[in-house]
Image (cartoon, helix red, strand yellow):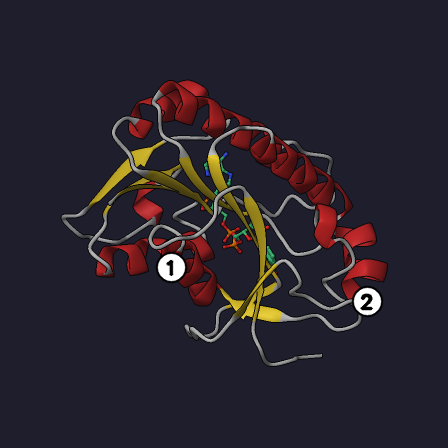
Amino acid sequence: MRLLIIGGTGKTGRKIIEQGLTQGHQITAIVRKPRKLKIDNPSLSIVKGNVLIPKSIEDSFKGQDAVLSALGHKRFFIKTTILSRGTKNIINAMRKNRVNRFICITSLGINDSKFKLGLYYTLFTIPVILFFYFLDKSKQEQLIMGSNLDWTIVRPGQLTNGKLRTNYHHGTKVGHYLITKMISRASVAHFMLSQLTGTNKYQKAVCITNQKIIF
Ligand SMILES: NC(=O)c1ccc[n+]([C@@H]2O[C@H](COP(=O)([O-])OP(=O)(O)OC[C@H]3O[C@@H](n4cnc5c(N)ncnc54)[C@H](OP(=O)(O)O)[C@@H]3O)[C@@H](O)[C@H]2O)c1
């Protein structure tokens, strides 16, 4: 398939690109700093773009079968709209270019998965550190849900750089009110790519964590 990846220079986005190439997909990566990607593969096209600047991204959506987003940032303590504005621009570019399939990472703990990232996140990390980030992620989800695209929202538990394990838990009931469940970025990438084939239902928010409980 022809896949457009957003956030490819990030830790999860890179895993999506690497695994996508291994699976034989034709990949276009929109990145702000092309030199950062350092993946040389004839099936990978790298396009310099910024999701906050529609003109810099729109042309790359032409002819794509699906868009996979691992957009994120680390500006936690200030009120930002990077995720929601960026996602709005992605959705508009998809509509313009008649691309319907959208798979996007948000996080466990957002909207109807509230409190399911464990007690520590619920009482400390989200209200103190990630308050604005989660507010923006919540808006991001609302935009996707209201888009009429064939979307899948992927809500991972705490991300790790561990290796790919394919025996992860996924579904609407995944997560825990007391314990923070984790998942490797490689496993999240694997799950996102697995959503491109088979009989997966669209317009669903899916939570994903490891089976093993880590306190
Ligand atoms: N960390 C956790 O425990 C956790 C848990 C659940 C969910 N998540 C979510 O999972 C997602 C992926 O996480 P990660 O750690 O892999 O993220 P990451 O390493 O921070 O990567 C984020 C990517 O987004 C790109 N980006 C940011 N602003 C952009 C813009 N304006 N235009 C284009 N690209 C832009 C970054 O590009 P640059 O390289 O140019 O900066 C980078 O490639 C994030 O949404 C994160 O919030 C994280």
- Which residue lies at the image location 78% right of the left edge and 67% below the top edge? 177
**Picture layout, residue 202 above or below residue 208:** above
Q: Residues within 10 Å of mark 2 (few under 14, many from 20)?
A: some
**Picture layout, residue 20 above or below residue 161:** above
Type of the residue with mark 2: Leu
Reading the chain from its start, which is encountered first: label 2 or label 1? Answer: 1
Distance (Cα) linking label 2 and label 1: 29 Å
In this orientation, which residue lies closer to the viewer: 70 or 148? 148
Q: x and y percent of residue 209 in the render?
A: 58, 68
Whether residue 82 can be seen here: no
| Quarter of the figure that contains the C terminus | bottom right
User: Which residue of the protein is positioned furthest toward the right in this rendering?
Assistant: 123
In this orientation, which residue lies closer to the viewer: 169 or 214? 169
- Which residue lies at the image location 45% right of the left edge and 56% below the top edge? 12
Query: Does the beta carbon of the residue at mark 2 sit less than 8 Å from ligand 1?
Result: no
Whether residue 52 can be seen here: yes
| Quarter of the figure that contains the N terminus | top left
Q: x and y percent of residue 146 in the render?
A: 60, 29
- Which residue lies at the image location 34% right of the left edge and 22% below the top edge? 97
User: Which residue of the protein is positioned furthest toward the left in this rendering?
Assistant: 42
Secondary structure of the residue carrying tag 1 is helix
Type of the residue with mark 1: Lys
Q: x and y percent of residue 135 in the render?
A: 73, 40
Residue at which label 1 appears = 15
For this view, does 2 lie left or right of residue 10? left
Residue at which label 2 appears = 119
Mark identifier at residue 137: none
For this view, does 125 lie left or right of residue 51? right
Q: x and y percent of residue 17 in the render?
A: 32, 53
**Picture layout, residue 209 above or below residue 56:** below
Secondary structure of the residue carrying tag 2 is helix
